[in-house]
């Protein structure tokens, strides 16, 4: 996996050293509001014990989970992934930030880097995000990155919105943006 740098962020592969910060995030009920739908929010200790799953997920070659960190201080803000989830057919695009870092455009900035890397360097054919219909911040991030609503998917009894973008659509959006700035 390649480290990706943007204006404010450094996205580097997640390691076990990130687990305490990730567990703090995953035991925050505000962060988990639309994610822990059928199970209680874990305690910090439970979340810490579960973190290893993230390193075990299968992913397209060159992808996986990146820690979203501050480019200057290396502080951990959250993570973003491109992995295979569920039946392994969909390339899942997921992102999660600690609450104090919401509202600064970090998810969108990180998402741009990962989507660009996925489509340009890894030549993936599409990516998809499953989003709870009430998770408006996440849906907005997906839309700002060019994903569009393709339907709903049942996830353990909850209907989630599926947002997706194909490589062709991504390339077309990129060229129209480049034309606008030329
Ligand atoms: C979803 C999440 C990653 C967004 O991170 P972020 O860095 O705050 O996102 P950005 O700042 O890049 O963009 C958020 C957008 O949503 C908008 N938004 C935020 N809360 C909103 C709300 N309640 N209703 C409508 N829009 C909202 C923001 O205004 C912004 O859009 P804008 O740039 O057009 O103003 C963050 O809230 C999070 O980690 N949530 C908990 C985990 C989660 O739900 N992950 C997604 C799982 S599908």
Image (cartoon, helix red, strand yellow):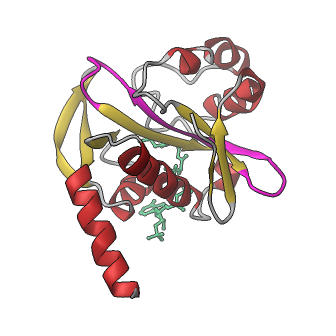
Check the picture and name the quadrant holding the N terminus: top right
Quadrant of image for the C terminus? bottom left
Front in this rendered view, residue 52 or 178: 178
Residue appearing at x 36%, y 34% in the figure: 92
Q: Position of residue 85 (x, y in %)?
A: 35, 23
Q: Is residue 39 above or below residue 177?
A: above
x, y percent for residue 12: 66, 40
Horizontal side of 1 relative to 153 (left or right) equals right
Residue 173 vertical placement versus 38 (above, below): below
Residue 164 or 139: which is nearer the viewer?
A: 164
Q: Is residue 136 magenta?
A: no
Range of magenta residues? 70-90
Residue lying at the far right in this picture: please name it.
Answer: 73
Q: Quadrant of residue 79?
A: top right
| 83 is within the stretch colored magenta | yes
Q: Count the numbered circles shown.
A: 0
Q: Quick check: 83 left or right of 42?
A: left
Percent position (x, y) of residue 29?
Answer: 59, 35
Q: Observer-nearest residue: 90 or 118? A: 118
Residue 49 is left or right of residue 93, and the answer is right
User: Which residue is rendered at x = 31% and y = 19% of the image?
Assistant: 86
Task: Give the residue drawn at x 61%, y 30%.
Answer: 26
In the rendered image, which quarter is residue 76 located in? Answer: top right
Task: Please state the horizontal and vertical placement of residue 122, each as a whole percent of the image.
Answer: 40, 40
Q: Is residue 81 above or below residue 142?
A: above
Residue at the limit of the structure toward the left, as seen here: 151
Which residue is located at x 36 percent, y 78 percent? 178
Residue 108 vertical placement versus 29 (above, below) = below
Q: Is residue 155 left or right of residue 9?
A: left
């Amino acid at each position: 996996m390649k480290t990706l740098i943007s204006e404010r962020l450094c996205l580097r592969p997640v390691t076990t050293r990130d687990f305490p910060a990730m567990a703090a995030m995953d035991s925050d009920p505000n962060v988990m509001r639309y994610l822990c739908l059928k199970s209680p929010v874990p305690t910090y200790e439970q979340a810490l014990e579960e973190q290893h799953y993230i390193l075990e997920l299968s992913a397209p070659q060159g992808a996986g989970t990146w820690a979203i960190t501050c480019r200057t201080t290396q502080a951990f803000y959250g993570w973003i992934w491109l992995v295979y989830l569920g039946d392994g057919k969909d390339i899942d695009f997921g992102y999660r930030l600690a609450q104090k870092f919401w509202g600064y455009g970090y998810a969108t900035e990180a998402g741009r880097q990962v989507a660009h890397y996925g489509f340009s360097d890894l030549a993936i054919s599409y990516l998809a995000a499953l989003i709870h219909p009430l998770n408006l911040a996440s849906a907005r991030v997906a839309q700002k990155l060019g994903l569009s609503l393709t339907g709903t998917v049942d996830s353990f009894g909850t209907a989630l919105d599926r947002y997706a973008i194909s490589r062709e659509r991504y390339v077309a959006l990129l060229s129209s943006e480049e034309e606008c700035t030329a």
